[in-house]
Image (spheres, rainbow, N blue to C red):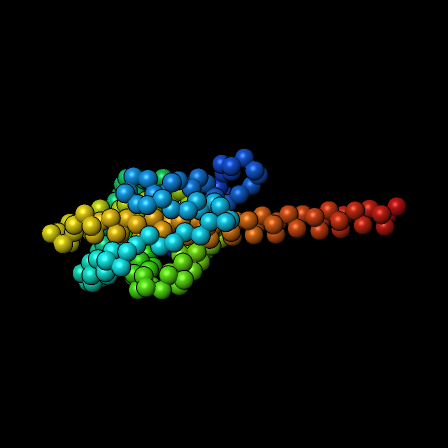
């Protein structure tokens, strides 16, 4: 998510600054309160190890999402492209995450990019899989969690994830026309809130794992140097 971003197209070598004041980290940005501003019920804190957010959707809301997706699925390529064009227009800093698009300033040229089309399709595929798993919450949770982990490996910061849901809704609203109701919008907002929380949880777990591995490596190096010095003496 954008991002609801996939790994391909992201520059894994680009470092991100530490915003938490705790040494080198992969992420940039804090986890916002995703429940605010969208009418959603309060969701669990993605930074809390004890929290376990439940999918905040009623059966009726799941059906609204599934029915609207049947229409949107017919034009997912165009939706994916427009979604990312809007994302880069409203949040141009997001382009820095994508080394393939970073130096393209002409949005018309970007619209014709095969790489952007492919990336848009990957994101839409994730949304499609999420819709298909609405009745299998454990699988939906794992899907978003693993995507968050992969985003950490490709250095795609959590601060961008919620932007994708906002742009998706802005793009599909005129496509669905009269079928886009306040109830449909609320259902999609809640789904994206949940997916973003689970992606951030996956990102932070992978980040902690990387930090632990790095600390272990440094410790081994120090021990090795210490033993070498003792042998010399």
Find residue 150 and report its horizontal and vertical position in percent. Answer: 45, 55
Give the side of residue 59 with respect to residue 228, left or right. Answer: left
Q: Nearer the viewer, residue 156 or 196?
A: 196
Q: Quadrant of residue 38?
A: top left
Give the side of residue 74 with respect to residue 218, left or right. Answer: left
Residue beneath the point at 41% across and 51% down: 53
Residue beneath the point at 44% across and 58% down: 146
Residue 177 in sight here: yes
Residue 173 in sight here: no
Numbered disc total = 0
Find residue 51 and report its horizontal and vertical position in percent. Answer: 46, 49
Residue beneath the point at 32% across and 45% down: 41
Residue beneath the point at 56% across and 52% down: 209
Q: Residue furthest toward the right?
A: 233
Find residue 204 and report its horizontal and vertical position in percent. Answer: 49, 48
Find residue 116 and report its horizontal and vertical position in percent. Answer: 31, 53
Q: Nearer the viewer, residue 107 or 186?
A: 186
Q: Nearer the viewer, residue 173 or 188?
A: 188
Rendered position, 80 above or below 15: below
Give the side of residue 7 with respect to residue 84, left or right. Answer: right
């Amino acid at each position: 998510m954008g991002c609801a971003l996939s790994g391909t197209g992201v520059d894994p070598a680009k470092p991100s600054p530490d915003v938490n004041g705790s040494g080198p980290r992969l992420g940039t940005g804090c986890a916002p309160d995703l429940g605010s501003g969208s009418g959603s019920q309060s969701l669990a804190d993605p930074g809390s190890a004890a929290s376990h957010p439940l999918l905040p959707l009623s059966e009726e809301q799941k059906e609204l999402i599934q029915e609207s997706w049947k229409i949107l699925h017919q034009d997912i390529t165009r939706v994916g492209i427009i979604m990312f064009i809007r994302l880069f227009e409203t949040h141009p800093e997001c382009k820095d995450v994508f080394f393939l698009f970073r130096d393209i300033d002409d949005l018309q040229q970007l619209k014709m990019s095969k790489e952007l089309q492919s990336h848009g399709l990957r994101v839409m595929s994730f949304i499609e899989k999420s819709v298909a798993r609405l009745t299998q919450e454990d699988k939906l949770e794992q899907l978003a969690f693993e995507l968050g982990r992969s985003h950490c490996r490709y250095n795609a910061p959590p601060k961008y994830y919620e932007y994708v849901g906002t742009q998706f809704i802005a793009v599909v609203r005129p496509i669905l026309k009269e079928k886009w109701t306040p109830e449909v919008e609320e259902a999609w907002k809640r789904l994206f809130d949940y997916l973003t929380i689970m992606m951030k949880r996956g990102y932070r777990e992978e980040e902690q794992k990387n930090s632990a591995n790095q600390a272990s490596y440094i410790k081994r190096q120090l021990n090795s140097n210490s033993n070498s010095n003792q042998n010399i003496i």
